[in-house]
Amino acid sequence: MTYLQVITRTFGRRPSLLAQNCASLMALLDDDWEQTLVIDEIGRGIEWANANLSTVPAGGEWVWILDDDDLCVMPNLIGVIKGLDAPSEYGVIAMRATHVQFGILPHDQHWAQRPVLGDCGFSNFFCRGQIWDQYRSKFADLAIYAADHAFYSYLWDQGVPFLWHDAVAAHYPRRSMGASE
């Protein structure tokens, strides 16, 4: 099992975005990661991609969703996570991401609080593999656009402990609507 499993939802009509995503991951300094692609080749959309996450088992100690239109901006990401020495009771590590339109997310007023709709995305969160496997079936009910917020809010409500690390791990270079683009 690898340390970090990166799940990338991708849409067949966006190969250049996937190539940029993969290049950002190839810049990671620690190679203890793997990428799992969730491919929508026929344009079923973001709701399908979200619901389909329920079928993806954890392949790493930590699971990170980094969509094809998002970039990893922290080459030492895995070393940083390993360095946090997060005790096993932490099920989620929350970090920051920059968004081309909204700036740094989550915003300071929402930092270290229950996830807020519109102020977080999948790439803000790293889920411990055993927590992912325990709760990923919830995605079957999350065939909605805001599944990122819904899933991590659900984990928060279940009492899964979050560890907040104030560092930027990812960048959303554009506002996206998934396969509808």
Image: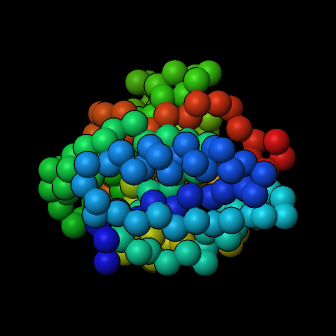
On the question of residue 76 being in view, the answer is yes
- Above/below status of 82 relative to 48: above
Q: Position of residue 163 (x, y in %)?
A: 29, 49
Residue at 47% across / 64% down in the picture? 35
Residue at 63% across / 44% down in the picture? 17
Horizontal side of residue 166 vs 137, given as left or right: left
Q: Position of residue 134 (x, y in %)?
A: 45, 77
- Above/below status of 73 relative to 147: above
- Above/below status of 102 relative to 129: above
Report the number of discs. Answer: 0
**Image quarter (top left, top right, bottom left or bottom right) of the C terminus:** top right
Horizontal side of residue 82 vs 121, given as left or right: left
Residue at 61% across / 74% down in the picture? 54
- Above/below status of 142 relative to 15: below
Q: Position of residue 100 (x, y in %)?
A: 58, 24
Coloring scheme used: rainbow
On the question of residue 159 being in view, the answer is no
Camera-side residue of 63 and 41:
41
**Image quarter (top left, top right, bottom left or bottom right) of the N terminus:** bottom left
